[in-house]
Amino acid sequence: MLLSATPHQQLSDQLAGEGVNLKIGPFHINLTSTLPGVADNLFHLYGAYPIQSSTELIDFYIQLKAPSAIRRWIRPQATFSFDGHLPFKPLPQRQSFAMFEWGLNWCVANNAHQYLVIHSAVVEKNGKAFIFPGTPGSGKSTLCAGLVSQGWRLLSDEMALVSITTGLITPIPRPISLKNESIEIVKSLSNELYVGKPIHDTAKGDVAHMRPPQSSVEKNDVQATPAAVIFPKYRKGAHTELSTLSKGRTFLKLAENSFNYHILGSMGFNVLTNLVEQCQCFNFTYQNLDEAYSTLGNLINA
């Protein structure tokens, strides 16, 4: 059964009880929570995912809850628990679902060492996956959301999972995290896109999440071949410019953007070397999204 087909009260009861089991990318996740708003956000942002049976082996047990009874009423807070551990300090309760998204990133980055995990957005078209590494403010999520609105397949907004055995990228299509000005930019792209209510005053400013397309979720298990590594930079007033980046410089920048390159050691070196060798490598400066679509579309067809 798809999560969106589950009656709201049933979903809330299941979250408060045994938890909801979801397969997100290659990972099986059990989420429990009694916090207000979690069921609603899960319904709207993960509705295309099927609820898994309770017999599945779980990779991550995640719980969102209030740290104490008093905190339910006075400055309500939320905690993120992973397998019973609390890796983060509590946050205001209104940020609980964003905390789930950030916490799940942390779970994958710190435990999924069957992959080289690179902080980046990844989209695919015509069998070619483009990797967009980026630091905060680079515009990678805005560009990712824009390309997805144009029919590109979403593999991830946050991380490229590069198999250490095949070099292919495993999808983990989740809500796209939008910040500050990019929220309204993405909302204006299409009436068919669903963007949740903004969460204000987070450490990253205003944050909202765009629902992943059902077509991307349905290809949850379809890996993609990396074809290009593109370092985006959104700059107001800039002309659209795609410039070649050396493979040596690309390697170094990807290593800096990897969560577990240092843990994988020589294996990480080999995986990253093979990735860079098979990809075209670029810096990409843009402001106008239509020009960005055209430029990257031409690269796909080249």
Image (cartoon, rainbow, N blue to C red):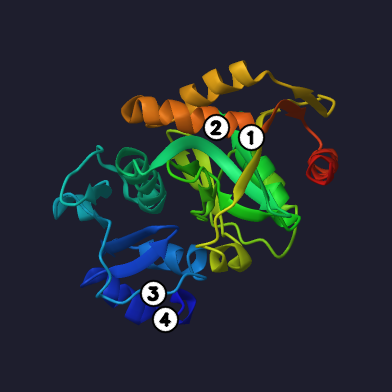
Pointer 4 residue: 6
Q: Which residue is denoted by mark 1 in the rendering?
A: 278
**Residue at the spot of label 2:** 274
* Amino acid type at mark 2: Asn
Given the image, on which type of amino acid does mark 4 rest? Thr
Residue nearer the viewer, 264 or 236: 264
Disc 3 element: loop
Q: Secondary structure at mark 4?
A: loop
Q: Quadrant of residue 234?
A: top right
Q: Which residue is mark 3?
A: 51
- Spatial separation of the CA atoms under disc 3 and disc 2: 36 Å
In the picture, the quarter occupied by the C terminus is top right
**Residue at the spot 46% in from the left edge and 69% down from the top edge:** 43
Q: Tag 1: residue type?
A: Gln
Disc nearer the start of the sequence (3/2): 3
In depth, the one of 72 and 30 nearer the eye is 30
Distance from disc 3 to disc 1, alpha carbons, whole Å, reads 37 Å
Q: Quick check: 21 above or below 188? A: below
